[in-house]
Amino acid sequence: MSPRRILASAVLVLVASGPARADKIAAPAAEGKNFDSELALLYRVVACADNGVAIPEEWNKVVERHCADLEQQKQRFRARYVDKAMPFIAKLRPAELPAEIVYPFGGGDLASALVTYPDATEITTMSLEHAGDPTRLSGLTALQLQRALADFRAAIRGLLALHDSSSVNLQKMQRGPVPGQVAFFLTALSVFGYQPVSLRYFRLEADGSIHYYSEQEIAALAETTAVKKKATWENTDHSVAFSNVEIGFRRSPDGPLVVHRHVAANLDDKHFGGSAVEKHLLKKGEVAAMTKAASYLLWKPNFSLIRAYLSQSAVFMVSDSTGIPPLHARQAGLAQVCYGKFTGAFLKANAQHGNAFVKLWSTQPFRKVPFRYGYPDRVGNLHLLVTQRQTPAVLP
């Protein structure tokens, strides 16, 4: 039997008789193609979750070696970041927050959203990276799989070691047989032991509403390649249908469905203003937000609209120094509380905002932060920033 047939049969058995029964994998909306079998395979092979999916015998040693390496990275990630950051940030969050989370410039980093907002019911990440084609993995030979998984481990190593990803690593996964963003997201779910149950792709209509692609629509778009969202970025080698993804998952077999959507988007003013992405975000009303390792884009004048959106719609936001600058926070009536130390920007950035952040940190008492959240400062100091409406954050 061919590898593809073995995988299809195994996934059918899992769905019919395993813990993820058919009545547990209904998507939040009836329409749209659900790539549930591809999802189960990616979760088993790439993210190394023990979900019972059988794989071709010729893959066994490749997957075993891959998962041994990835599990070491996951363990370090849990010990250095998850186990320290989750209880720390839990003390900072107000008792009642919106369950909808918005994370701009959050390419690949579902893990930090789950660390920061573990009770979220809806998470929206946005970045220049497209989600990726989930259908290619099953057709690989063992050697092709070995190479693809090695590329993936190299790409995700930065996220698991430093808790954020470089643009270079994210771009590398825009091409090839492993859907980069999807694979990053599934690895995050595996770190927490969550159960992914649906994988669908969508576009945003002009009014910001979601249109889920049907199987027929995906087939019709097969020859239309998703193009890069920024001139200096990498083009993809997959269909535009695979740009925006929705993953439904559960924290327990009988738990409520949590929805994570990733939107491939350029968030500068030229592309964001009046766009379907902006309208989609505005439909959410009040949200909780976060950003980290965001290249100080919110300090720049040509990202004024996404900054204004966060200032107006986010009632609570966790960030590093790449968050909302003090000038704009004050103008929006927001309070900011600092943790750790900040003596200057990690990368070359706007000096006025940099100096304002240095002053902000220097005027507040030192509050230790025991983990890296995004960039360190220019000399390696760890830091974190809470920005929220009116009432200052609760201090540990």
Image (spheres, rainbow, N blue to C red):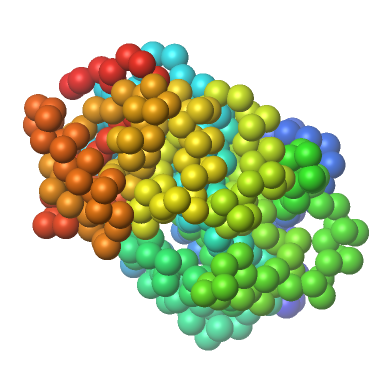
Q: Is residue 362 above or below residue 43?
A: above
Q: Is residue 194 visible in this depiction of the protein?
A: no
Q: Is residue 260 left or right of residue 243?
A: left
Q: Give x and y (percent) for residue 58.
A: 56, 79
Q: Position of residue 4 (x, y in %)?
A: 72, 72
For this view, does 111 lie left or right of residue 136?
left
Residue 390 sits in which quadrant? top left
* Residue 155, image x, y percentages: 41, 69
Q: Quadrant of residue 43?
A: bottom right
Q: Residue at x 33, y 40 (%)?
A: 325
The one of 290 and 21 positioned closer to us in this rendering: 290
At 52% across and 43% down in the image, what residue appears?
A: 306
Q: Residue, x 30% and y 35% (percent of image)?
A: 326
Residue 220 in view here: yes
**Image quadrant containing the N terminus:** bottom right
Out of 334 and 26, give the one closest to the viewer. 334
What residue lies at 37% left-to-right and 24% top-to-bottom?
A: 334
Say how many tags the image has.
Answer: 0
